[in-house]
Amino acid sequence: MERKPLHILAKPEEVADRVITAGDPSRVRQLAQYLEDAKLVNENRDFLVYTGKYKGVPVSVAVHGIGAPSATIVFEELIMLGAKLIVRLGSCGGMVEGMSVGDVVIPTGASYGIGGTIWSYAPFDCTVAVPDFDVLKTLIEEAQRAGLNYYVGPIISSDSFYGEGEDFTKKWIERGMIAVEMEAASLFVVGRLRRIKTGALLLVSDTIKEPGKMATAEELKEAVERASRAVFEAVVKIKV
């Protein structure tokens, strides 16, 4: 049976095969400003999707909301509409001493708790949650070229924002995770199942040295601009 989007009401020809996603609508509006001839093709349920061109290559930018359930709906529907590459340009909590707000994390993979969204896709199995290697490699190369202060390593994708205590952080740091966020694991798993390329580049919005303090979209605006240039450069170079 053919699957049709129920939330993103754009037409297939209105969504590019290369897509950059973020949870925050203000960040997606900012990203849309870097596109040539950007057009708003969906605003249903505030899942904003803009499509334009970057250096002549069609690219879409889209809001996926907060958490795996919301994000996975958007990832699936973007794929239904023709996306072949999805890169998450999100935020994360830094878990390495010395990380600062505005630094970049490029995940090599994402741990996740048993259950939740991924469990609905692959119950009773441990499904690998890793980005496409070409995407990972290209993101690292562009981060280097842009002079970003970046870290590369595994992260944890959590289903809870306020339920994470000191024990949570301590446990995942001991397991080698370098940052925490909420959507990358589901993106990587859906990408594997649907046979599309995925990756992520994350901006550190808070750190273990200042727990409970998180940078606002406005405070991260300059960092987003620097990081987004690297992501745009990467997505137009990756073969899809």
Image (spheres, helix red, strand yellow):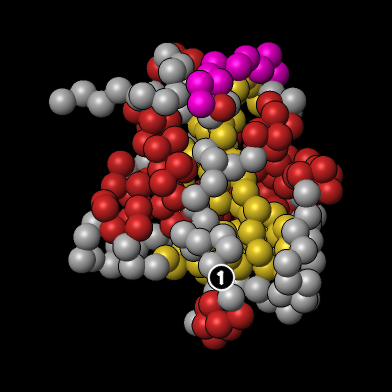
Give the residue drawn at x 30%, y 23%: 4
The residue beneath circle 1 is 164
Horizontal placement of 105 versus 108: left or right?
Answer: right
Q: Secondary structure at mark 1?
A: loop
Say which of 98 and 23 sits in front. 23
Give the residue drawn at x 32%, y 63%: 115
The kind of residue on which mark 1 rests is: Glu
Q: Quadrant of the C terminus?
A: top left
Say which of 145 and 77 sits in front. 77
Give the residue drawn at x 59%, y 30%: 61
Judge whether residue 133 can be spotted in this image.
Answer: no
Say which of 89 and 72 sits in front. 72
Compared to residue 76, the image places residue 222 above or below, namely: below
Any magenta on residue 139?
A: no
Compared to residue 155, the image places residue 135 above or below, namely: above
Residue 89 in percent (x, y) is at: 62, 45
Residue 122 in percent (x, y) is at: 24, 57
Magenta segment, which residues? 36-45
Residue 149 appears in which quarter of the rendering? bottom right
Give the residue drawn at x 75%, y 59%: 214
Compared to residue 163, the image places residue 84 above or below, namely: above
Say which of 174 and 35 sits in front. 174
Judge whether residue 162 can be spotted in this image.
Answer: yes
Residue 78 appears in which quarter of the rendering? top left
Residue projecting furthest to the front:
162
